[in-house]
Image (cartoon, rainbow, N blue to C red):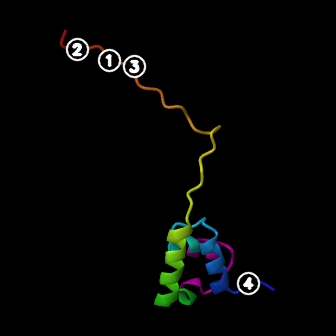
Amino acid sequence: MSMPTVERAYALARSGKFSNIDTLKDRLKADGCRAVDALLANRSIRGHIQAICAATFKPPMPDPETIETIQPEPAQPDEQS
């Protein structure tokens, strides 16, 4: 038995992976949940889920192996000389 959409929304909000309710709703829709907008339209539910997202969101850490080292550009000769 799958978890009801509203319960899943709360679980996802508590996961710390979503910065706001819009990204969370996109995930629910991608997972095949139906009537996401209608189920989360209630101002109280929407506000509570948004607050949980804001309190628990942790941006993913970049992978050190994929970070490009930014090299400073070489100094250009002064053209006024």
Residue at image position (47%, 82%) is 47
Q: Residues within 10 Å of mark 3 (few under 14, many from 20)?
A: few
Q: Position of residue 42 (x, y in %)?
A: 50, 90
Q: Which residue is mark 2?
A: 79
| Mark nearer the viewer, 3 or 2 | 3
Give the number of the disc on residue 3: 4
Whether pointer 1 and pointer 4 mark residues with C-beta atoms closer than 8 Å, the reply is no
Q: Dot 3: what SS?
A: loop
Q: Dot 4: what SS?
A: loop
**Residue 40 lies in the magenta-colored region:** no
Q: Quadrant of residue 18?
A: bottom right
Give whichever of discs 4 and 2 has the lower sequence position: 4
Disc 3 to disc 2, C-alpha distance: 15 Å
Give whichever of discs 4 and 3 has the lower sequence position: 4
Give whichever of discs 1 and 4 has the lower sequence position: 4
Disc 4 to disc 3, C-alpha distance: 57 Å
Q: Which residue is mark 1?
A: 76
Amino acid on which disc 4 is placed: Met
Q: Position of residue 12 (x, y in %)?
A: 64, 73
Residue at image position (51%, 82%) is 48
Residue 71 is left or right of residue 65, and the answer is: left
Tell me where the magenta segment starts and ends, as one range: 25-37
Amino acid on which disc 3 is placed: Pro
Q: Residues within 10 Å of mark 2 (few under 14, many from 20)?
A: few
Residue at image position (68%, 74%) is 31
Whether pointer 4 and pointer 3 mark residues with C-beta atoms closer than 8 Å, the reply is no
Whether pointer 1 and pointer 3 mark residues with C-beta atoms closer than 8 Å, the reply is yes
Q: If the image is split into quadrants, where does the C terminus sit? A: top left
Q: Which residue is mark 3?
A: 74
Relative depth, front residue between 62 and 14: 14
Most distant residue in the left direction: 80
Q: If the image is split into quadrants, where does the N terminus sit? A: bottom right
